[in-house]
Image (spheres, rainbow, N blue to C red):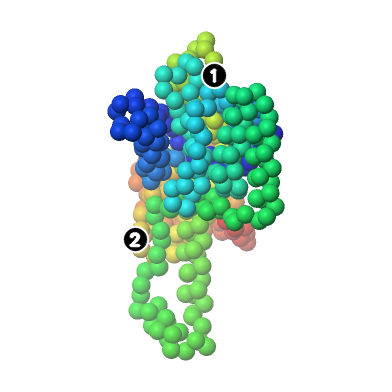
Amino acid sequence: AKEEIFQLHYGRRLPIHRQPPGDVPGGGAAAELRSVEDAVQKVAAMEAQGQVWAQEMLLQVTGSAIRLLDVHSKEELESYGLAGVLRCEAVLPGARSLLLLLCQEPQQPLPDAHFFQCTHLGAEPIRDDINSALVDFKSGSNAQRKEALRENQEKMQNGAPPVPGGTGPRPPPPHRKVVITPSATLNEMETQSQRDAANPLDPGVRRTERDVELLNRVLDDIEAFVSKLQKSAEAFRVLEQLKRSSRGRRRQPGEGLLTLRARIPTMEEFEDTLAKMKYSFSLLARLQSNISNPSSEELVRFLFGPLKMVVETSGGPKFANEIRSPMLTREAVTLLRGCLGAQEAELWGSLGDNWTQPRYLACPGTTLPLTP
């Protein structure tokens, strides 16, 4: 069986309402096409709102089914029998290469549309493989798929061009970006640098720029982790609803993927994110006079929302309290004491000395080893 690694875009199952031929001029094919285009537009709208989840999977085509496997364990998460596949198309909106599967189980009143972003081979060869498997499944032979596999192999050997957008989906942009506050001194330095390229910028300015870049990376990592937590919670909620509505019946379509997505991150990921939160407080204190829109104080208060979620999801303050490194700087402790509200200060205090004591008191002579 042939395997293909791809990005699975699976926010929610999108029902395709297949209209009767009389509803659209030109008959059933035009009606179906319009419905598929509507589904593509809906996926684009959901993606713009951050409702589309990307999950790397393995797709395996056999003589009787299309299977979705976990990349690491090879556990089967979903299986679509070829008897229930109504349509398989390659859809190319913009620079992406999407595979569309239109499937309908006997007990379903309407078919479901599943979209997959194919980042390695592209959607076309996978479509050809699946469609040839469908022909052979219906005819009881194995001739069409052998030919399709041979042609795809020849294309790969001849060096087919890379798939558009083959680098995978871009991460969502952060909600807040830190900028260096324009100052007369900085502008003068930049002007002088333009006049004489041999004179480098002041080391302090270079360090500020480096710290701002580092802070943005840390905030991006924190945001990505919190988004992962939110999607895990949403998947768990949907999964519980599915289980309650289908007691005593067979597994519902999409249940395997929801089970995978509902798994919470590892404790190592929690530890890494909490350490980055501590590090961000020290960076914000160091950059307090250099950044604005948002300011260091605003970002500290903003971070306490994600911090509360991470602490609660990891089992409470006890786990976070054990995150010793990196310790906060004296300036970071001063910053937090001066800008936190009552509820934020209560959460901060519950995390213990490893979060509330400055580094020079807790462990003199230590450094910040974290490198995001």
Task: Reply above or below: 346 against 198.
Answer: above
The answer to whether residue 221 is above or below residue 319 is below
> Which residue in the structure is indicated by mark 1?
251
- What residue sits 45% from the left and 36% below the top? 11
- Point 65% across, 45% down: residue: 152
Quadrant of the snapshot with the C terminus: bottom right
Q: Viewed as shown, does residue 115 lie left or right of 22?
A: right
Q: Earlier in the sequence, mark 2 or mark 1?
A: 1
- Farthest residue to the top: give it: 248
Question: Closer to the camera, 110 or 326?
Answer: 110
Residue 364 to residue 120: above or below: below
Q: At 68% across and 49% down in the image, what residue appears?
A: 154
- Give the spatial CA distance, label 2 vs label 1: 49 Å
Instruction: Give residue 204's position: percent from left, percent from top.
Output: 49, 75
Which residue lies at the image location 40% right of the left edge and 32% below the top edge? Answer: 29
Q: Is residue 141 visible?
A: yes
Give amino acid for label 1.
Arg
**Rendering coords of residue 182 (x, y %):** 36, 72
Residue 230 in the image, given as x and y percentages of width and height: 45, 37
Q: Determine the secondary structure under disc 1.
A: loop
Q: Nearer the viewer, residue 109 or 339?
A: 109
Q: Secondary structure at mark 2?
A: loop
Splitting the image into 4 quarters, where does residue 158 fall? bottom right
Q: Is residue 181 left or right of residue 221?
A: left
List the residue tagged with mark 2: 293
- Mark 1 nearby-residue class (10 Å; few <14, some 14–19, many ≥20): few
